[in-house]
Image (cartoon, helix red, strand yellow):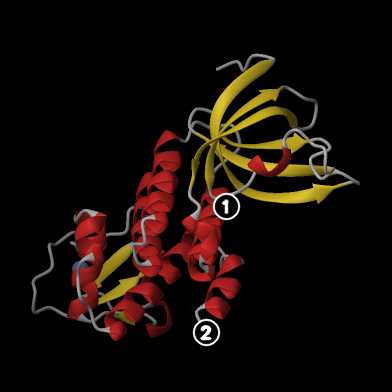
Amino acid sequence: MPVPRRYVTDAIVLSRFDLGEADRVLTLITPELGKLKAIAKGIRRPASRLGGSLEPFAELTVALARGRTFDVVTEVRVGHAWLRLRDDLERAATAWYLAELADRSLEERHSAEAQYALLHRAYELLDAGMDPGRVARWYEMHLADELGQRPEVDRCVECDRRLEEDETFRWVPALGGLLCAAHPGPPAERTNLSRDALKLLKAYRHRPIEEVCALRLPPEVESEVEAAMRAFVRHSLEREARSLDFLDEVRGR
Ligand SMILES: [Zn+2]
């Protein structure tokens, strides 16, 4: 799709860095154009018209002009400001983590409507006070799905057999999910998964997030599922997300 010289799009800021004396380069996610980099010229001057509205944790309407290296932001309007994301450190750190996952997993200028909608929903949920850990797990599960790497939580990835309740199985991110006991292999790449953890993974996969957030669960089960999904994401991205260090620090881990 050819992009006109000037265009307007909804966008969420994924990351940013300062450039030169007063400029800032932003990575945006947009529904139709996917991820793109844009420059906000002079934004760090006190008199800048773009001012404080070009911030993360908000859905923006951004007017841009095509540029040689980066497109240039000419106007910004705030659509939804998810203000509660800013008030709480764990929510904010989780929001950065989700943005990093989107940033790392998207190619520039490829339509990303589903990924955009997913991040939008996750920010709404965080803003509405849902548990940040559960929102993060739900997002990881569905982002992987949108990227064509849906974690297999119902069948064995090798023999495609639906697993029974009383079977033992392992979690193997490199293979895409659950593996039954019929397939031996080096233990380092396979972790045992408790039945309760599997139930929770299935809930993230198949149940609406509101329902998952209402579940009462022992912290060990949540930790197990967090470790399983982190391993899965690390494998998909081929490295650990940088923002996890900050998130862990905020949570006192
Ligand atoms: Zn099998």
Residue 101 position, x and y percent, is 52, 55
The picture quadrant for ligand 1 comes to: bottom left
**Side (left or right) of 204 relative to 37:** left
Residue drawn at (38%, 73%), measured in percent from left and top?
Answer: 226
Give residue 228's position: percent from left, percent from top.
Answer: 37, 73
Front-most of residues 202 and 152: 202
227 in relation to 116, above or below: below
Q: Where does the N terminus fall, quadrant-wise?
A: top right
Q: Secondary structure at mark 2?
A: loop
The image quadrant that residue 72 belongs to is: top right
Q: Earlier in the sequence, mark 2 or mark 1?
A: 1
Q: Which mark is residue 130?
A: none
- The residue to which callout 2 is attached is 252
According to the image, label 1 marks what residue?
Answer: 104
Residue 104: x and y, percent?
A: 57, 52
Q: Nearer the viewer, mark 2 or mark 1?
A: 2
Quadrant of the image occupied by residue 223? bottom left
Query: In percent of the image, x 39 and y 38: which residue is there?
Result: 114
Q: Residue at x 31, y 73 (%)?
A: 171
Give the spatial CA distance, label 2 vs label 1: 25 Å
Relative to the observer, which residue lies in front, 191 or 4? Answer: 4
Q: Amino acid at mark 1?
A: Arg
Tally of numbered discs: 2
At label 1, counting other C-alpha atoms closer than 10 Å, the crowd grade (few under 14, some 14-19, many 20 or more) is few
